[in-house]
Image (tube, grey):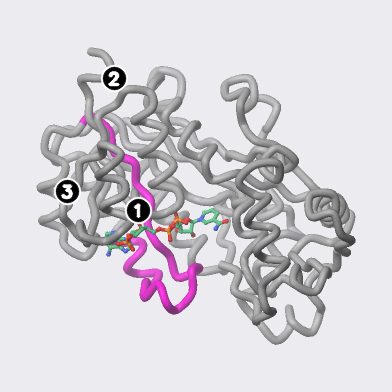
């Protein structure tokens, strides 16, 4: 059977990762269905216009997920998380429930291949950060089930670097790593390319857990790259000790970066052998990253909005 005859159901297709995956699968000739909670939203209409079939459903409604799985070959599973802030309205318990429900309904409908997107900090031991430990539990559950699965663990997205609140509007960029500490990043677009490659070759990628990233940069290198792209000086400092002490969430993430878990341990050279087009930070900044960076520099400052 060719990919053209097979359908992949994508969760979160109106969001970053799901959108990237849906687009990449479509480009490779797969039929793509997207479970969306509001088919009339602008984003849902935009993906429908792209030729992606919308299935109305909600992660809170198990029956709608069950119904969406009928006739499906592959499933891309990603959940919103508490790490995206209170506005997401998602608790850690809900994230776990959503992840498990997708896996259970996939099995019940004879889905052949489940690809679950986790995060790079997830590992054998707890992180003590809610939205990573949720993923650890979902990963463990998926591995315990009788279904062909692949788990990807993306690094921090390049896109988060231009979110408000990290000083770009003041020419003083701050992030988690120390100035000379390397940290891995991935362009969201590349998550889709990798996941499409995984669905295309289940014999190679099935039953694997793969940490994914496109580049490794230090804080100082990032500031140099930002300065070159924006053609103005941008300095780098780690988030201040007082911020990391006051804000337990950011402090916890900084600790995970120091431990190396959130800084990332993807084998980028071997990923590149399979996916040569993975974007480096320079390539991202020459493309979609550039307008995002320039907009962040021109924005008015606000508190750290990183998630
Ligand atoms: N940011 C990073 O650097 C990073 C790195 C690794 C992993 N992660 C993880 O990535 C995940 C988020 O992925 P993302 O950034 O792609 O998310 P996103 O862009 O915020 O998109 C979330 C998607 O989930 C959908 N959704 C939310 N609630 C739903 C519900 N009740 N029923 C059905 N669909 C629902 C949204 O649909 P609507 O259009 O209806 O809102 C949207 O399509 C989180 O678990 C996060 O921890 C993030």
The residue nearer to you, when weighing 148 against 267, is 267
* Element at label 3: strand
Q: Position of residue 110 (x, y in %)?
A: 16, 33
> Is the CB of mark 1 within 8 Å of ligand 1?
yes
Q: Are marks 3 and 2 in contact (CB under 8 Å)?
A: no
Nearest to N terminus: mark 3 or mark 1? 1
> Is the CB of mark 3 within 8 Å of ligand 1?
no
Q: Is residue 206 left or right of residue 165?
A: left
The part of the chain drawn in magenta is 73-97
Give the number of the disc on residue 87.
Answer: none
- Disc 2 target residue: 3
- Residue 306 falls in image quadrant: bottom right
Tell me the distance, in whole angstroms, between the alpha carbons under discs 2 and 1: 22 Å
Marks 2 and 1: which is nearer the front?
Answer: 1
Which of the four quarters of the rendered structure image does ligand 1 lie in?
Answer: bottom left
- Disc 3 target residue: 55
Q: In what quadrant of the picture does the N terminus appear?
A: top left
Q: Are marks 2 and 1 in contact (CB under 8 Å)?
A: no
Q: Position of residue 205 (x, y in %)?
A: 45, 25
Residue at 17 percent across and 57 percent down: it is: 57
Residue at 32 percent across and 68 percent down: it is: 94
Q: Is residue 45 left or right of residue 62?
A: right
The residue nearer to you, when weighing 223 against 7, is 223
Give the number of the disc on residue 14.
Answer: 1
The residue nearer to you, when weighing 173 against 231, is 231
């Amino acid at each position: 059977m060719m990919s053209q005859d097979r359908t992949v159901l994508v969760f979160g297709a109106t969001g970053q990762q799901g959108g990237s995956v849906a687009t990449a699968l479509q480009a490779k000739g797969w039929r793509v269905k997207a479970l969306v909670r509001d088919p009339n939203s602008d984003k849902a209409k935009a993906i429908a216009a792209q030729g992606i079939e919308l299935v109305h459903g909600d992660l809170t409604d198990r029956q709608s997920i069950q119904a969406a799985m009928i006739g499906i070959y592959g499933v891309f599973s990603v959940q919103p998380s508490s790490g995206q802030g209170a506005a997401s309205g998602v608790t850690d318990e809900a994230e776990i429930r959503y992840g498990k429900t997708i896996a259970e309904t996939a099995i019940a409908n004879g889905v052949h291949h489940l690809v679950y997107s986790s995060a790079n900090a997830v590992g054998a031991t707890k992180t003590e950060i809610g939205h990573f430990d949720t993923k650890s539990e979902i990963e463990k559950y998926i591995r315990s089930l009788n279904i062909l699965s692949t788990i990807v663990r993306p690094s921090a997205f390049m896109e988060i670097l231009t979110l408000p609140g990290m000083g770009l509007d003041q020419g003083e960029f701050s992030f988690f790593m120390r100035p000379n500490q390397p940290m891995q990043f991935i362009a969201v677009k590349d998550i889709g390319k990798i996941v499409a490659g995984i669905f295309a070759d289940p014999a190679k990628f099935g039953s694997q857990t793969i940490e994914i990233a496109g580049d490794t940069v230090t804080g100082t290198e990032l500031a140099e790259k930002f300065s070159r792209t924006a053609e103005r000086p941008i300095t780098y400092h780690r988030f201040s000790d007082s911020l990391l002490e006051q804000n337990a969430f950011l402090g916890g993430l900084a600790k995970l970066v120091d431990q190396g878990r959130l800084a990332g341990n993807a084998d980028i050279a071997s990923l590149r052998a399979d996916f040569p087009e993975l974007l480096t930070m320079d390539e991202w900044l020459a493309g979609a990253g550039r307008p995002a960076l320039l907009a962040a520099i021109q924005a008015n400052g606000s508190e750290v909005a990183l998630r």
